[in-house]
Amino acid sequence: MRKENSTNFINNVTLENFCNAHKVLSKISGRWKLSILFALSEKETNYSDFKVVLPDITDRILSKQLKELKIDGLIGNRKSKLESIYFLTDKGEEIMAVLRMFKKL
Amino acid sequence: MRKENSTNFINNVTLENFCNAHKVLSKISGRWKLSILFALSEKETNYSDFKVVLPDITDRILSKQLKELKIDGLIGNRKSKLESIYFLTDKGEEIMAVLRMFKKL
């Protein structure tokens, strides 16, 4: 994550809100993470289903983005004999609840 | 703004929420825009005050980011004899209200 800029906000609440927003946005930035999170907000998804929901994504990018989102604690996965099912964690759900509040610009 | 990925979400509401979030995030992405928006959420600010709040920012970058945020309708400015005062527009305030909801990861 890029170094946060040094800022001299007047109020500590502003700084805290800024840091929270900056951290979340840096963890969901990138061309595909938002799409993956919104896909998982609809339903738990296995690897091959992602390719149906996101037809343009390559295997290399999908695995990398899933791995990063998992490391950051926004998604989890359950392994069964045949497949690995991905889902949003509580933290992921929390972020989605906020992301859904953005209105049409 | 980068081409949105083609997605096959099940539900149109998901697609709409995704598009809104994607557009907002692309307009506030970049190292300095978030800092500028949070600075303006504290108080209306003139150009030189930005350099106090954001000591690391260069003139070139500050003018570019302010111009882009203005074109995107998130900030406005009022010119008086001596200075130009920047402020959040209603749209900017709306986005800030959402950004403040991100909790500590």
Image: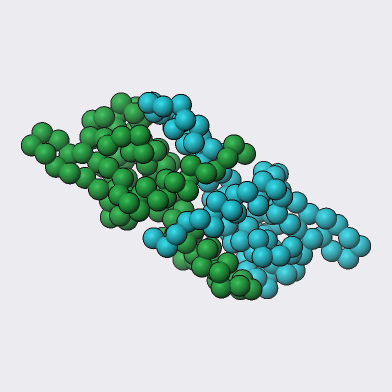
Chain colours: A cyan, B green
Res B68 visible? no
Front in this rendered view, residue B5 or B60 = B5
Query: Residue A2, image x and y in percent?
Result: 51, 37
Quadrant where the image shows the N terminus of chain A: top right
Q: Nearer the viewer, residue A87 or B31?
A: A87
Q: Going by the image, does B75 lie left or right of A105? A: left
Residue extending furthest right? A81
Q: Quadrant of residue B8?
A: bottom right
* Residue B10 lies in quadrant: bottom right
What residue is shown at x 58% (from left), y 67% (from top)?
B14
Question: Height in image: A5 above or below B91?
Answer: above
How many badges with numbers are in the image? 0
* Residue A20 seen in the figure: yes
Is residue A34 placed above or below B64 in the rendered structure?
Answer: below
Residue pictured at 27% horizontal, 37% vertical: B44
Q: Position of residue A59 (x, y in %)?
A: 69, 63
Q: Residue A90, percent across and down? A: 70, 48
* Relative horizontal placement of residue B5, taking residue A80 as reference (left or right): left
Where is residue A41? Give x, y as percent.
Answer: 65, 61
Residue B45 located left or right of residue B34: left
**Among the 4 quarters of the image, the one containing residue A53:** bottom right
Asked if A25 appears above or below B55 in the picture, the reply is below
Locate the C terminus of chain A by quadrant: bottom left
Residue beneath the point at 47% across and 56% down = A102
